Amino acid sequence: MVNRRLVRYLTCAGYEASGVEDPSELEAQAEELSLAAADAFDAHVVEKLVRDKPSVTGVLFTAEPLRRCLRFAVENPDISNIFGRPDFESPPRRWEMLMVLRRLLRPEAGSPPFTAYLDWGFRGFQEHVASTEGRDAVVQRVESATGGLGVPKRVTEMLSELTHELLMNAMYDAPVDDAGKPKYAMNRKASLALAEDERPTFRFGTDGSRVAVQVTDPFGRLERKHVFEGLARGLEDGEMDRSHGGAGLGMALCHNASVAMFFDVVREVKTEVTAIFDLDLNLREFRNQAKSLHFFAL
C-alpha cells in the first residue's frame, strides 16, 4: 500500500515511476534511473546507485530517528533529501513529498513561496530584522502568536527558541566583509545594528495545523556540509550533544523543534531556512516523530 502511494506521488510530481519490493530490481534498472527513493533500511542500495551513477539523485525515507540514516547523507552529496514518516505503515507527508519531488525534477524553479508551506487562509507576519532589539521583538511576537493557539507552553518555548536560533545564524554568522571574512561571528553576545543590505527577513505563519518559521539572509554562504555534518555532530548518541557547541548544537536545536527543515541556498544571493512544526501532534508524538531534512543549492 505504501509503495503504491509513493508511486502515485512520484507520478503526480512529473516522474515516470515504478515501485519495486526487492532492491535487486532497482539495481537492474540503474541505467534508466534519474531518481532512486528507498527506506533507510535499503539506504546502502541508494548509496551504491548514486556513487556508481552520478546522474542519479538519492532520496531516503525513515520512520526512525534521523541520526540513523544521516551518515548516508553526510558521506554522499547526491543524497540531500531525507523524509521522515509517522510509522512503517505510512508514507511521508503528501505536501512535503510533492514539493520536494517537483523541485528535484525542476531545480531551476528555485524555492517555493512561503505560502506553499501552509494551507490557504493562514495568518502570519513578516519582518526585516535590523538589530538585536528587533530580534527580541520578533521572538516575543512569535511567542504571543503561538500562545494564542492554545498549545502547551513547551511548544511556545520551542518555537521561540527556534526563532531566536535562526535569527542569530542569519544576523551573526551570515554577514561577511568585502574580503569574505565574517563580520560579527566572533562575538554572538554583542549588541548588533545591521546595515540595510545585511538584514535578514523573518516570516511566520500558521494555518492551525502547522506553524512555519522562515529566515532569509542576503548572503548565501551556507554550505551543505555545515547542515549535514553539523547536525550529525549535534545528534551524536541520540541526544542533543552539547559537548561540541557551535553549529552542531544550534542545528540540533532547530532539528528538535521542527518536523521538517528546508535549506535553500543561492550562492552569494540568499540562504533561506524554513522550519515546520506540526500542531496536530502531542509532545510525546512530536518527540518520537521521524524528522525530515532537505537541502537545495543553486
Image (spheres, rainbow, N blue to C red):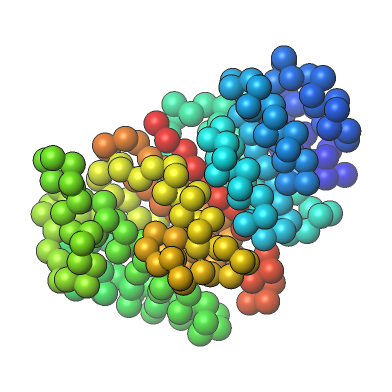
In which quadrant is the C terminus drawn?
top left
Left or right, residue 269 beside residue 36: left
Residue found farthest to the top: 31
Residue 111 placement (x, y as % from top left)? 43, 39
Question: Residue lying farthest front?
Answer: 243
Residue displayed at 30% across by 70% down: 138
Left or right of 7 in this view: 182: left
- Give above or below for 296 relative to 257: above
- Percent position (x, y) of residue 211? 50, 64
What is the count of numbered marks? 0
Q: Is residue 292 visible?
A: yes
Residue 243 position (above or below residue 202): below
- In this view, the residue in front, 203 or 88, is 88
Corner quadrant of residue 199: bottom left
Residue placed most toward the observer, 126 or 84: 84
- Residue at 46% from the left image edge and 72% from the top image edge: 242
Task: Report if residue 15 is visible in the image.
Answer: no
Q: Is residue 229 left or right of residue 38?
A: left
Q: Looking at the image, which residue is at 52% across and 26% down?
A: 106
Q: Is residue 232 left or right of residue 86?
A: left
Which residue appears at 37% of the width and 63% of the height? 246
Residue 1: x %, y % from top left: 87, 44
Seen from the viewer's position, the closer of residues 90 and 52 is 52
- Image spot of residue 259 (x, y percent): 58, 60
> Which image quadrant is residue 56 in?
top right
